[in-house]
Image (cartoon, grey):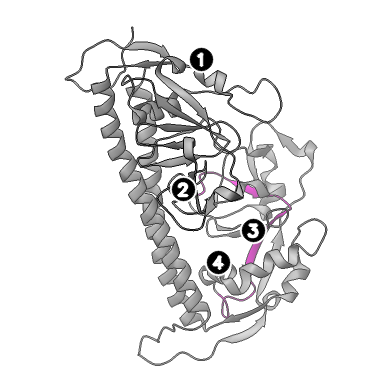
Amino acid sequence: MAVPKLRFKEFDGTFFRSSIKELAKIHVGRDLVEDAYSPIKTETHIYPIYSNSVDKEGLYGYYNFEEFNFDNDALTVVGRGAGLGKAFYRQGSFGTIGRLLCLTPKNKSFHPKYLSDYINAKLIIHNESGGIPQLPRSSLENYEVVLPSYEEQKKTATFLSAVDEKIAQLSQKLHLLGQYKQGMMQKLFSQQIRFKADDGSEFGEWEETILSDIVNLFHGYQFRTSDFTSKGIAVIKIGNVIGNNLDLANLTYINENRLEDFKKFEILNGDILMSLTGNIGRIIEVKNKPFIILQNYRVGKFIPLNENFLIKPFLKYLLTSDLVFGRFSQLANQSAQANFGKQDMDKIAVFYPSVSEQTKIANFLSSIDQKIDVVSGQLEQAKLWKKGLLQQMFV
């Protein structure tokens, strides 16, 4: 039988093939009922594992699960809904709700952490029914795995747990940086914190105006279906305006010979974009674009009308501040379909400081963003590293 590409050198034994039902008993989680609920943890009440809250004790309160209580030897697999097929291993007692399947070992033939990572790396679910995707207990019971000895599983699991801990630390660091940035933005834009000029003097009062007096909203070109080709110059649609930068997956293209026709719709590094339809308010600053990209109609570009009064680096933070950001969705949702346009900018009041103070605020928040980008990159690299490990450590 084949062995993995990556293996601890002290192990050379063969691997064995087995179905899940030969290794474990599968329990279907319990549906939550009101009489089992407790707002505080008691001797008999524990917290339930949800597919989106595996590490969030007490998020939804505590429940008495009785026969649905499981301990350190158990692992769970999402059988329906978000995260379908994803396996979790968490130490400590827990209960499972109906959409989760819980595996308890029949004997000491598998390590729960090892099997959890194995399922995450190998399990592929085909939705042949065409209905709501799900993983029935019978399908999981018949799923075959290839495992080494228990001792090799244990060492591999311990190693992968250390990798998970590193990922968790980076995730927490990223979360804390995001919280810090949010807190500082609240204080800066409410003027609880003010910078001083280079000579130590106080800056003047902030000016009040409406957004349309200092910012232009530039719409992209309304490309038609007949304009699109299988390759060429990329066009950015609202679905690509997401996250901290552009999502360059699932792009649409126009013929590369038409660049001059649409030159004024070219998106440049430093441009500030927002989706204007559907999920309103996704604001990004374009960074490190790898090729020429054009702006579709329902993607909006914010441009300062006069950089003697408002600079672009500050504009991004002004738009994402609590004073402005919340108004985007409020105004957009007043229509049947969420849309935001130039007329809505007349309804948004803003406060802004002198250009000198804008520069200091933008530089300060930009330094936090740079730290966030570094940690975010480290986190993505760690996740990719683990993904590569899983591919090489399992048969």
For disc 1, the marked residue is 142
Residue 233, position as x, y percentages in the image: 63, 40
Disc 2 from disc 3: Cα separation: 40 Å
Which amino acid type is marked by label 2?
Answer: Tyr
Question: Distance of mark 3 from mark 1, alpha carbons?
Answer: 48 Å
Coordinates of residue 203 in the picture (x, y in percent) = 46, 89
**Badge 2: residue crowd in 10 Å (few <14, some 14–19, many ≥20):** many
Dot 3 alpha-carbon crowd within 10 angstroms: few under 14, some 14 to 19, many 20 or more? many
Which mark is on residue 316?
4
| Identity of the residue drawn at 44% across and 84% down | 194
Q: Which residue is drawn at 32% across and 26% down?
A: 111
Residue 47, horizontal then vertical, whole percent: 46, 48
- Residue 332: in magenta span: no
Q: Which of 376 and 65 is in front in this view?
A: 65
The stretch in magenta equals 289-310
- Label 1, label 2: how far apart the Cα atoms are: 30 Å
- SS label for mark 4: helix
Dot 3 and dot 1 residues touching (CB under 8 Å) = no
Q: In which quarter of the image is residue 254?
A: top right
Please tell me which of labels 3 and 1 falls first in the chain: 1
Which residue carries the number 2 mark?
Answer: 47
Q: In which quarter of the image is residue 389?
A: top left
Closer-to-camera residue (328/173): 173
